[in-house]
Amino acid sequence: MADVYTNPEKHVVLHNSVKMPILGLGTSHDGGYSHEAVVYALKICGYRHIDTAKRYGCETYIAEAVKASGVPREEIFLATKCWPTDYGTTATRDAFNGSCQRLASEYLDMYLLHWPDVPSRVKDKKQLLQDTWRTLEVLLDEERVRVIGISNFLEQHLEMIMEECSVIPHVNQCEFHPYNNPKKLRDYCTERNIQFEGYCPLANGQILNEPKIQEIAGIHGKSPAQVLIRWNLQKRVVCIPKSTKEHRVRENSEIFDFTLSQKDFETLDLLHCDLHVSWDPNCVT
Ligand SMILES: NC(=O)c1ccc[n+]([C@@H]2O[C@H](COP(=O)([O-])OP(=O)(O)OC[C@H]3O[C@@H](n4cnc5c(N)ncnc54)[C@H](OP(=O)(O)O)[C@@H]3O)[C@@H](O)[C@H]2O)c1
């Protein structure tokens, strides 16, 4: 994927003209972290986008993997997130600096507000979200970060930010797979030039045995995981599958050599059942 920034199929262009690789590697505390898999993704498979978060606890390890891969830092789109307990003007700047330090980078490619809720002690949620967003805008202005966005924000949360903002979020990262396909939210984002990014593209493995997906995979001579990633890409949704296994990291990157048909899309689009595989409404206390 050496052509990730030159081949228009392999990146999206955000509303500030930054090119974001459409395929990234997910990392998280769920299911463990593999140094070898991240090095392999960068060095052998050509991934140029890594998604992480302070909350995942692996930013330091990612810095080690980037170094070990030998891939120049400036070729990699490095994205991390701010957890709500770090929201607020000073706290968010401190959290940003902490992430940069752990990731051994003076700048970040993307910084996201991880979750729309705030700790229960906070009286004015809207004010805190707006102050926090303002901090991201300042970091953008200072060129400490190239792209700013949010994650898990629904329409009503986006409205709170946009009521006062001077920069419309570039990206909204939300759960996205055929069992959870929030069309209204995606349309809302598209109408406002906010790039939709999907997480849990394989529904954490829970969708891979779905007979309709297996049937489509058989038709194309591909795996169910590849069909799911391709479904994201053809919808121009940025996709960040995670694997700790080198052979799966490779498999998940071999998705630019086939095309799903209109009929495949019709089948996959009918599977929506509002299933959240990564959704804890009480995760912020
Ligand atoms: N913003 C948020 O709130 C949020 C929430 C959740 C996730 N995320 C991001 O999204 C990324 C992906 O989400 P996720 O890890 O929850 O789910 P996922 O990518 O849908 O699924 C990962 C699971 O599928 C397995 N897998 C990967 N490739 C496979 C393949 N080709 N065949 C069969 N199984 C395969 C992995 O196991 P092995 O490791 O054993 O291969 C792992 O158990 C995360 O790493 C994180 O960066 C963001």
Image (tube, grey):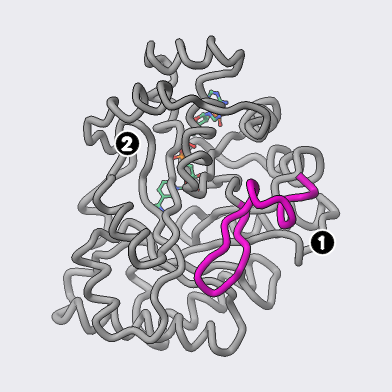
Check disc 2 and report the residue beneath it.
Answer: 277
Q: Which residues are magenta?
A: 1-21
- At x 44%, y 45%, the residue is 199
Q: Amino acid at mark 2?
A: Val
- At x 17%, y 75%, the residue is 121
Question: In the image, residue 188 lies at what x, y percent?
Answer: 28, 59
Question: In the image, residue 181 lies at what x, y percent?
Answer: 31, 39
Check disc 1 and report the residue beneath it.
Answer: 72
| 58 relative to 279 in the view: left or right | right
Quarter of the figure that contains the C terminus = bottom left
Whether the magenta-drawn stretch holds residue 285 is answered as: no
Tag 2's secondary structure? loop
Compare residues 169 and 93 and report the one nearer the observer: 169
Quarter of the figure that contains the N terminus = top right
- Note whether 35 is above or below 66 in the view shown: above
Q: Amino acid at mark 1?
A: Pro
Does label 1 or label 2 sit earlier along the sequence? 1
Q: Is mark 2 within 8 Å of ligand 1?
A: yes
| 284 relative to 10 in the view: left or right | left
- At x 62%, y 53%, the residue is 11
- At x 45%, y 84%, the residue is 137
